[in-house]
């Protein structure tokens, strides 16, 4: 059985947020969040193309956003150096976390959505307790020598990609830091679904698959263009394919094992396709380029 891949645009979301900086599915893939250069965050049902709510309160453009595991809260961050926790249903701010001294590029919840991790151009990752009375970070990770571009969390790890050309993995169970040297600025990192490997994207137009424990290079994926701008990389929900946005307006799919390009989506955007989000269970993907988000589905998909 061949794995079905997203092949056609099922919907286009005209976000009206200026440049869309990030698009993110929620945990179950029923909803998505977009954030933009107009300082706003929007909640959507991407499958129906409906806009549900707008969240306003940032002072400058919003660069990343994430939903909590139970969909009751979301967190966002951006150029105003702020990390904000929102109540999804009321649209109100629950908390504003201050402490970063530069633009904050990325934000994620932990698995229980009790802690927020944020990564900044100020070279630090800060961990914030969503429930504490105090708004100071509970921990600051300051090992990077340059800005943090990307952050991912598992149940016991924090994974970061930095402009200093390194992928860092903090194993919280054993209190250990593992560093893999890539060389070129690392713009995106993610875990494979099986938790065994780490995928990274760097500004030398190369994606790399590393064994998480040994750091061994298992695969390199090339053909796309990523030399000036941050472009997201991810894996399909079966781990069978590696996916990346590109500066040439396309989305590339590689076979995970033999590293060959097996599929490209050419109508992804006029400019850089910089943000991607893959659905947790369906052959469905979101991509952001310029001011629109596209919802991609498999070739034989028909709307109900």
Image: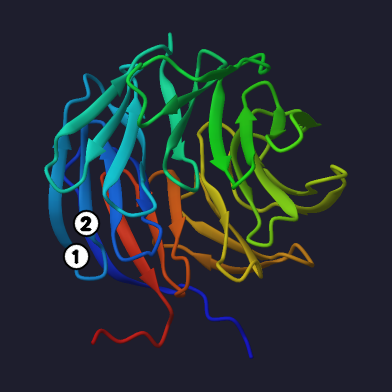
- Numbered mark located on residue 44 in the image: 2
Q: Is residue 32 visible?
A: yes
Q: Is residue 38 visible?
A: no
Quadrant of res 59: top left
Q: Specify the color scheme.
A: rainbow
- Horizontal side of residue 114 vs 219, given as left or right: left
Q: State the residue in front, 191 or 232.
A: 191
Q: State the residue in front, 202 or 101.
A: 101
Whether residue 229 is situated above or below residue 196 in the rendered picture: above
Q: Residues within 10 Å of mark 1 (few under 14, many from 20)?
A: some
Residue at (72% x, 64% y) in the render: 256
- Residue beneath label 1, please? 49
Whether residue 262 is situated above or below residue 82 in the rendered picture: below
Discs 1, 2 touching: Cβ within 8 Å: yes
Residue at (19% x, 39% y) in the render: 17
- Residue 208: % across, % down: 73, 47
Residue at (76% x, 35% y) in the render: 174
Nearer mark to the viewer, of 1 and 2: 2
- Horizontal side of residue 7 vs 208, given as left or right: left
- Residue 176: % across, % down: 77, 30
SS state under label 2: strand
Quadrant of res 75: top left
- Residue 98: % across, % down: 35, 14
């Amino acid at each position: 059985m061949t794995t079905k891949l997203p092949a056609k645009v099922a919907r286009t979301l005209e976000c009206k947020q200026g440049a869309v900086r990030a698009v993110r599915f929620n945990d179950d893939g029923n909803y998505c969040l977009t954030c933009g250069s107009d300082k706003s965050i929007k909640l959507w049902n991407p499958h129906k193309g409906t806009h549900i709510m707008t969240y306003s309160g940032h002072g400058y453009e919003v660069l990343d956003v994430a939903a909590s595991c139970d969909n009751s809260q979301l967190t966002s961050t951006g150029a105003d150096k702020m990390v904000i926790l929102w109540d999804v249903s009321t649209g109100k701010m629950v908390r504003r976390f201050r402490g970063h001294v530069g633009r904050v590029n990325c934000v994620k919840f932990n698995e229980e959505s009790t802690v927020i991790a944020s990564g900044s151009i100020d070279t630090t990752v800060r961990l914030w307790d969503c429930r504490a009375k105090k708004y100071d970070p509970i921990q600051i990770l300051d090992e990077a020598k340059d800005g943090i571009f990307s952050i991912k969390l598992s149940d016991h790890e924090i994974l970061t990609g930095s402009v200093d050309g390194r992928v860092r993995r903090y194993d919280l169970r054993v209190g250990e830091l593992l560093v893999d040297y890539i060389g070129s600025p690392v713009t995106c990192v993610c875990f494979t679904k099986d938790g065994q490997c780490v995928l990274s994207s760097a500004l030398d137009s190369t994606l790399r698959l590393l064994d998480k424990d040994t750091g061994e290079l298992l695969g390199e994926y090339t053909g796309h263009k990523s030399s000036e701008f941050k472009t997201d990389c991810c894996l399909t929900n079966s781990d069978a394919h590696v996916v990346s946005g590109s500066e040439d307006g396309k989305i590339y799919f590689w076979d995970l094992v033999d590293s060959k390009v097996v599929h490209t989506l050419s109508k992804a955007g006029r400019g850089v396709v910089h943000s991607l989000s893959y659905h947790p269970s369906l052959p469905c993907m979101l991509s952001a380029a310029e001011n629109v988000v596209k919802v991609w589905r498999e070739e034989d998909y028909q709307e109900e």
